[in-house]
Image: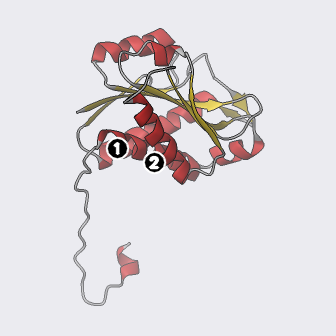
């Protein structure tokens, strides 16, 4: 069973990065909520907790302590970048090695399959979130809020969906999550067309 913590960056009194009429804290929560919903609807063997479920102020130490106490086995921290660049990148703790780097590779490639972002590479850094978790953790930076082109994409619900599904596909691949049997069966009456059933 995958015990997954989804960590929407920032929140409450901490808006995170801001630009182009957007606040990071709102975007990260949108992406995390969609990841949670897609995983719960489509996959078995996953239990999910979120570090925040609304616009709450939650400290970094509260986030990692709660995850460690729960006994999570993967921590996914979702962020939006700023600072004049463009594109997508992700981070793991320096020198962490397998399996964390394998999870990073999967999430990185699956997001970029769906999201039209410049590939800024797979990186390592000494963030609290990556250092203080007792299990693998990956932090994603989903575009630059202060870049006009990136921000225009982040304003689209269809693009948020692509980012969420990229994260989901990377998680499912990393942990070999079995798909739920969510097949929908239609009984076709004579004269019905495919269009009337969709």
- Coordinates of residue 37 in the picture (x, y in percent): 38, 42
- Coordinates of residue 14 in the picture (x, y in percent): 61, 18
Quick check: 87 above or below 133? below
| Residue visible at 77% across and 32% down in the picture | 84
On the rendered image, what quadrant is the N terminus found in? top left
Report the Cα–Cα distance between label 2 and label 1.
10 Å
Q: Is residue 86 left or right of residue 88?
A: right
The picture quadrant where one finds residue 52 is top left
Q: Which residue is mark 1?
A: 172
Q: Is residue 83 left or right of residue 57?
A: right
| Residue visible at 31% across and 47% down in the picture | 41
Q: Do callouts 2 and 1 mark residues in contact (Cβ within 8 Å)?
A: no
**Is tag 2's residue or tag 1's residue first in the polypeptide sequence?**
2
Disc 1 crowd, CA 10 A, few/some/many (<14, 14-19, 20+): many
Quick check: 19 above or below 149? above
Give 46 or 51, whichever is nearer the viewer.
46
Task: Report the number of discs.
Answer: 2
Give 18 or 53, whichever is nearer the viewer.
18
Quick check: 69 above or below 22? above
Q: How is the image coloured?
A: secondary structure
On the rendered image, what quadrant is the C terminus found in? bottom left
Q: Which residue is mark 2?
A: 165
Kindly identify which numbered label has been placed on residue 84: none
- Coordinates of residue 131 in the picture (x, y in percent): 47, 14
- State the SS at label 2: helix
- Coordinates of residue 176 in the picture (x, y in percent): 29, 43
The picture quadrant where one finds residue 118 is top right
Mark 2 or 1: the one toward you: 1
The picture quadrant where one finds residue 140 is top right
């Amino acid at each position: 069973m995958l015990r997954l913590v989804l960590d929407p960056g920032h929140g409450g009194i901490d808006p995170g990065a801001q630009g182009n009429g957007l606040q990071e804290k709102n975007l990260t929560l949108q992406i995390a909520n969609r990841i949670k919903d897609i995983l719960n609807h489509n996959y078995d063997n996953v239990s999910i907790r979120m570090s925040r479920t609304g616009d709450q102020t939650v400290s970094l130490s509260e986030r990692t302590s709660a995850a460690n106490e729960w006994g999570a086995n993967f921590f996914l921290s979702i962020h939006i970048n700023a600072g004049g660049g463009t594109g997508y990148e992700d981070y793991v703790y320096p020198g962490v090695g397998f399996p964390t780097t394998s999870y990073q590779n999967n999430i990185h490639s699956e997001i970029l399959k769906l999201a039209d972002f410049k590939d800024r590479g797979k990186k390592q850094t000494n963030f609290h979130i990556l250092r203080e978790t007792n299990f693998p953790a990956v932090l994603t930076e989903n575009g630059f809020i202060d870049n006009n082109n990136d921000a225009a994409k982040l304003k689209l619900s269809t693009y948020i969906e692509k980012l969420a599904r990229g994260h989901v596909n990377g998680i499912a691949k990393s942990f070999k999550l079995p798909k739920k049997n969510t097949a929908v069966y239609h009984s076709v009456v004579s004269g019905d067309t495919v269009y009337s059933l969709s």
